[in-house]
Image (cartoon, rainbow, N blue to C red):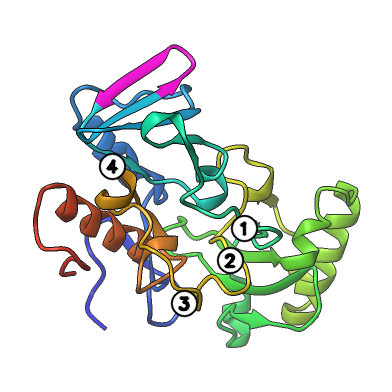
Amino acid sequence: MSAPAAGCYLTAFSGGAQQERFEGGAHTLAERLAAALDPPVLLGVPVRRVRLDAGPRVLVEGPGLSLAGGHAVLAVPPGMAARIDVRGPGGAPTRPVARPPAGRGSAVKLHLVYERPFWREAGLSGWAAGDRGPVRFTVDDSAGRGGAGVLIGFVTGGDARRWAATPPAERRRAVLARVTRWFGPEAGEPVAFLQQDWQAEEFVEGCWAAVPEFGAWTTPRPAPGGRERDGGLHFCGTEHSGAFYGHLEGAVRSGRAVAARVLGAPAGEAAP
């Protein structure tokens, strides 16, 4: 494996698209890209409607927002895309993206912070997996933390869907009981217990990827976002990538492929 890029840290994940993380968080990548754009990115203005006219011409509308152009790229999860009112030529409603029924990503991300990565003293990697919840696996994310020990854990599936209805004290007790079983008594005494329930985020609706409905991958249908079908409306995101589905790498590949299509380059996956 090659050395990580500048500003990245190696984590305990092995290979694939999970072995590095950004210093300061992955959101810094989006912030730096946005800072270079002119006109600037509009925040707090959710898109509610997309109108497809002949031409092609695309009209994007929201609260106090009305933008027209030859192309629009919808780079949101499928569930969010399905909440946008998309109308074809003549005002006919169209639903180019199916809303995943109960298959949206269900995950809660946990950060358990300790004064030091004590598990290493026992020769443990920090990586653990189990068949019982609520937290089903952890990974050591201590690199670049100034000597602090950090275990990242994930609550997924049915455990995650029950998370919001579980009293906070019970959540903490159940999680610490699990990591204590894996790493010993010291794991039950973190200096910080942080959680992010991605299901509760209005404009995310879950993490880390939506799961298509039964038959979605085996039923022949036109490619979503094709110009011939949707008049300049393109769909983009990790769920639209043929590789690294559910990862940042998949989102980047999908974005490059859509950008190439909009700019008139040959269709298909852009080179990595």
The x, y position of residue 89, in whole percent, is: 36, 34
Location of the C terminus by quadrant is bottom left
Mark 1 vs mark 4: which is more N-terminal? 1
Query: Is residue 64 in the magenta section?
Result: yes
For the residue pair 234 and 200, the one nearer the viewer reads as 234
Asked whether the beta carbons under mark 1 and mark 2 sit within 8 Å of each other, the answer is yes
Disc 4: CA contacts within 10 A as few (<14), some (14-19) or many (>=20): many
Q: Which residue is mark 1?
A: 100
Q: Which residue is mark 2?
A: 211
Mark 1 vs mark 3: which is more N-terminal? 3
Residue at disc 1, secondary structure: loop
Horizontally, residue 126 falls left or right of residue 62, namely right
Span of residues in magenta: 61-68
Magenta stretch secondary structure, dominant? strand
Horizontally, residue 44 falls left or right of residue 185, namely left
In space, the residues marked 4 and 3 are separated at their CA atoms by: 41 Å
Q: Which residue is mark 4?
A: 231
Residue at disc 4, secondary structure: loop
Asked whether residue 205 is in view, the answer is yes
Mark 1 vs mark 2: which is more N-terminal? 1
Instruction: Indicate which label's residue lies in the foreground, 4 or 2.
Output: 4
In space, the residues marked 4 and 2 are separated at their CA atoms by: 26 Å
Residue type at the position of mark 1: Pro
Residue 6 quadrant: bottom left
The x, y position of residue 153, in whole percent, is: 65, 66
For the residue pair 20 and 115, the one nearer the viewer reads as 20
Residue 115 quadrant: bottom right
Residue type at the position of mark 4: Gly
Residue type at the position of mark 3: Phe
Q: Which mark is residue 13?
A: 3
For the residue pair 134 and 203, the one nearer the viewer reads as 203
